[in-house]
Image: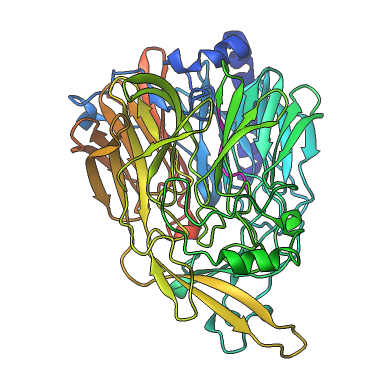
Amino acid sequence: MKILFHVVALAMGVFSGVAAWGQSASTVDMPRLLNAGKDGKNWLIPGRDYGNQRFVPLDQINTQNVKSLALRWKFQTGIKDAFQTTPLVADGVMYITTPKNNVIALDAKTGTQLWRYEHTYKTDKFCCGVANRGAGLGYGKVFMATADAGLVALDQKSGKSVWKIALAAPGAGKAETTKALGSSDPLRDATVTGASGAGANMAPLVYKGKVIVGITGAGYGLHLEGKKGQKLGAVVGMAGDYGLRGFLAAFDVETGKEVWRWHTVANKGWEGEWREATQDGAPLHRDIAAEKAAFTKYADAWKTGGGSTWTTPALDPNLGLLFLGVGNPSPQMDGLTRPGDNLYTVSLVALDVETGKIRWHYQQVPHDLWGYDVASPPVLFDTEVDGKHVAVVGQASKTGWFYVNDRTSGKFLYKSEAFVPQEGIFTPPTKEGVRIAPGAGGGASWSPVSYDASSGIVYVAGVHMPTLYTVKEAPAENGQPAQHYTTATMTDEPRWGTLSAIDTRIGKIVWQKKIEKPLIGGVVATKGGLVFVGEGNGKVDAFDAKTGDLLWQYATEAGVNAPPISYEVDGMQYVAIASGGTPLFGNKPGDALLVFALPK
């Protein structure tokens, strides 16, 4: 009887909430989306504005009063897993996604549930877990990419399904298995926590009648559980035709019909220029002669070439360009069967937003052997270079530098000081094993940055997690063919994070804070002079944006590995963040969406 009563009460709450929503809301149309960065009350786009600046022009909460910030309300989804959502807020209604692809609409002032969409999966095998990074909003709809490689459009007022499409066959691709590892390899008995196979977790981007999204799992490798249940103990890349060919695509917001599709690996020119160094001059120690000799045998490697798309692109409406980060090539880390530069993996790419055609690319790491995805969302801003005003795109890389490129041409302009320790970077894996930092986890992982245009400072969440890279050969045995593979094993030494304030005008670190655990989640800065970030140990922090001093901290019950946001309802500023951990980094799971405000 208690359960029945709860369901009835919830249904009544949904009905009244939807009615209230319908009376107060305005349509989220293109004029509103184009001006989202100036709208202090709402958070309409995953990166807050099309430039992904994530800067909030609100100062009710500031350096003087943030110590009084208190929990105003908490909503628990009932799903304890990798909770990475960026909430969206429009006209007093908040939209969140859960790790299992539910979408929930909440009263942004009180936390009352207005409606809930429950997703039904087409498979129970997911390449990259069930994490989801948020929804897209516009044209009266809420859009979500799903772990089973789908795209869903919901009615914004009711949460009812409008249309659903498949982006790719869920789990598609040749499955890796530990049976292919050598019988004496201690990783052979490890638990598999993830492998290649199509999925999707980025927050979709809505623009001019299109919803834009891409797939993950294209170059994911074989992820193995570590010691003491540590979810990321090792990553294995096996030579051969493992993986998929990634893509980004645009769909009609009304029908779901595909408008264009751009593949993240090139079918012609995949080999690139056979670069012996990165474009900014760092040597890669490649055996170019051996790669060229192998190219004829592996000329079709692009067909399973990898290149996942992990996070929402940035967009310049004036140039009509999308700026996209592309993941690592497949096989991950093992380059034996994919000779060449492996375009356009580990690249920052500019696409025509209307056609999906490539305008330019900048490959941060040709022929990647370390898992250096371009994962953190690109950010757009203006700066001065050699005394000239330049529109640029920046990206916090897994290599540990913040790269800056010309937005129109893609020309490399400069990179920042390293925001994490760098040791042995770009050293090829060896049979003896080589320790490298940053490793496969970054640098900067998928965490979005925040940029303050008034100061030219970008705030970057970083990861220090050294990794041991080893090349191995498994002989033919027990019916298994011989296998060449590369392992990236997480070392037992301390891992930690960094929060860095980088002056983009000169590439220098203004201040930096060492954080107890790798910093995975993202940053938001505000006009009140504050920088908010969550920690893997469950803390939510507010730092002074100018000095880096810790001004406020709140302890939650789970790892905080999601990006914070800030918004305003009825004259009150709020800060919201998901507390749900990320098992991949061994942080405690949870299911709470936490919202803070000053005392009334």
Q: Which residues fall within the magenta stretch?
A: 307-314
Q: Quadrant of the N terminus?
A: top right
Where residue 69 sits: x, y (%)?
A: 27, 30
Q: Residue at x 55, y 44 (%)?
A: 347
Indicate the colouring scheme.
rainbow
Q: In front: 361, or 290?
A: 290
Q: Is residue 527 above or below residue 378?
A: above
Q: Quadrant of residue 54?
A: top left
Where residue 559 sits: x, y (%)?
A: 40, 51
Q: Residue at x 33, y 36 (%)?
A: 459
Residue 7 is one of the magenta-drawn residues? no
Q: In front: 298, or 217?
A: 298
Q: Residue at x 61, y 82 (%)?
A: 473
Q: Would you say 43 lies left or right of 136 here?
A: left
Where residue 105 sits: x, y (%)?
A: 58, 28
Q: Would you say 78 lies left or right of 304 here?
A: left
Q: Would you say 519 lies left or right of 359 here?
A: left
Q: Is residue 15 above or below residue 201?
A: above
Q: Quadrant of residue 53?
A: top left
Q: Residue at x 25, y 25 (%)?
A: 529
Can see residue 26? no
Where residue 133 sits: x, y (%)?
A: 55, 40
Query: What secondary structure is the magenta-colored segment mainly?
Result: loop
Can see residue 143? yes
Q: Is residue 327 above or below residue 260?
A: below
Q: Quadrant of the C terminus?
A: top left
| Labels in figure, total | 0
